[in-house]
Image (cartoon, grey):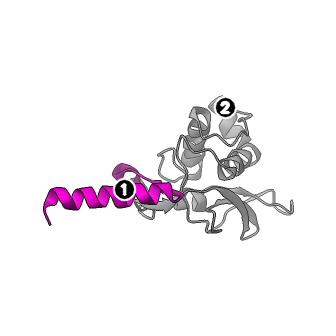
Amino acid sequence: MSTRMTRRAATVALMAAGFAGVQLVSAGAAAADPITTLATPTCSKSVTYQGALVPAASNGSVTCNMVRGNVSDGVLRLQDTMNDCYRTALTRVRVYPLSVDGNFGGNTEKALREVQRVAGTGIDGQYGPNTRKAMLHVDPNFGDPCRRVS
C-alpha cells in the first residue's frame, strides 16, 4: 500500500471516529496531555465519580476530553464546577460568574486555562484526564464542597 493510500485510510478512520462521538485532538494537544490520545471520547454528560460530579463520556467513562467548540452536558458540568470551586481564580481573569450554558466557548477556555494554572497542571485550555485529576470537583452531597479525584 502506498504512503498516500495509508494516509487516506488513516484519515477516513479518524473521521469515522469523530462521527461516532469521539473527540479528535491535535498532535500538539496530545503532547501536552500524554494520556489523551487521538481518539479520546468527548465528555458528553456528568457522573458521580469518587464522591464528586465530573464530566464523562456517553459510556460513563471519566477518561474523556473537551475542547473549544464542544456543546454538551459535560461542558455544563465543567462550567458549574469552575464557578463553584474556582470563584477567586475566575474573578481574577474576569469571567466570574461563568455562563453555565453547555457551550465550550472563549470564556470557558479562558476560565479553564486559569484553573489549570491554579491547579498546577499543563495549561492548554482543554479538559482531559490530567486536568480532571489536578482540578477540584463539586461534591454532590455538600460534605466537602470541592474535592480532587483520580
- Measuring from the top left, give residue 39's x and y in whole percent: 44, 61
Residue furthest toward the top? 94
Q: Is residue 143 left or right of residue 41?
A: right
Q: Quadrant of residue 147?
A: bottom right
Identify the residue under disc 1.
31
Q: Is residue 13 magenta?
A: yes
Q: Is residue 87 left or right of residue 4?
A: right
Residue at image position (62%, 31%) is 93
- Measuring from the top left, give residue 78's x and y in whole percent: 67, 49
Image quadrant where one finds the C terminus: bottom right
- The answer to whether the residue labelled 1 contacts the one labelled 2, judged by CB atoms less than 8 Å apart, is no
The residue type indicated by label 2 comes to Val
Who is closer to the viewer here, 126 or 7? 7
Q: In the rendered structure, which disc, 1 or 2, sits on the residue that comes first in sequence?
A: 1
| Residue at mark 1 to residue at mark 2: CA–CA distance | 28 Å
Q: Is residue 69 magenta?
A: no
